[in-house]
Amino acid sequence: FVKLSKRDPFAGVLKPGGSYYYTTNHSTLVAFNVGHKFKGGNGFKIIGGHTDSPHLKVKPISKRSGSGCVQLGVECYGGGLWHTWFDRDLGISGRVLVRNTDPETGNEKIDQRMVRIAKPIARVSTLCIHLQTAEERGSFKINKEEHLSP
């Protein structure tokens, strides 16, 4: 596969039988093959798909402190089995934006970085089981707006 730049026109670059790709925002991959018999103007077919993984997304500007802990507000992304995320050690990974100074110009800029902290540093806790009634344990329903806020 040959890497393409979205900023440059594809005209004159794509050849019959060629395989190409480009990325967007460090999170989207577009890859395609041009048929060996392709002739410009004859049209083409596109087949697309995507995958995503349910996860808890840290809300921007959500840091709070309480009970001697740093707390982060999170929101649900995707259709997860959210009860399985409670009361377990969690790491943090994903894209972060970092404010930097450009060494050449001295201007402030924002860079994207991918991070992965595999060490368990987070937990979404529930009420201790001995403080819940049997009915509460049996009907554990998550209110995404209220139960995931610190």
Image (cartoon, helix red, strand yellow):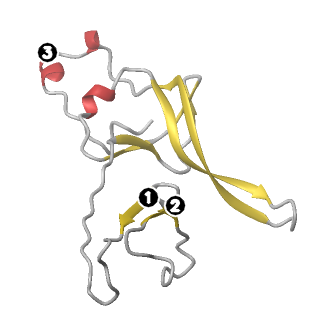
Compare residues 96 and 43 and report the one nearer the observer.
Answer: 43
Query: Disc 1 designates what residue?
Result: 28
**Residue sitting at x 31%, y 71%:** 35
Q: Secondary structure at mark 2?
A: loop
Query: Disc 2 designates what residue?
Result: 25
**Residue sitting at x 42%, y 68%:** 18
Compare residues 26 and 74 and report the one nearer the observer.
Answer: 26
Query: Is the residue 33 above or below the residue 63 in the image?
Result: below
Query: Is the residue 52 above or below the residue 130 in the image?
Result: below
Q: CA distance from mark 3 to mark 2?
A: 47 Å
Q: Nearer the viewer, mark 3 or mark 2?
A: 2
| x, y percent for residue 39 | 32, 84
Q: Secondary structure at mark 1?
A: strand
Mark 2 belongs to which amino acid?
A: Asn
Q: Are marks 1 and 2 in contact (CB under 8 Å)?
A: yes
| x, y percent for residue 38 | 31, 79
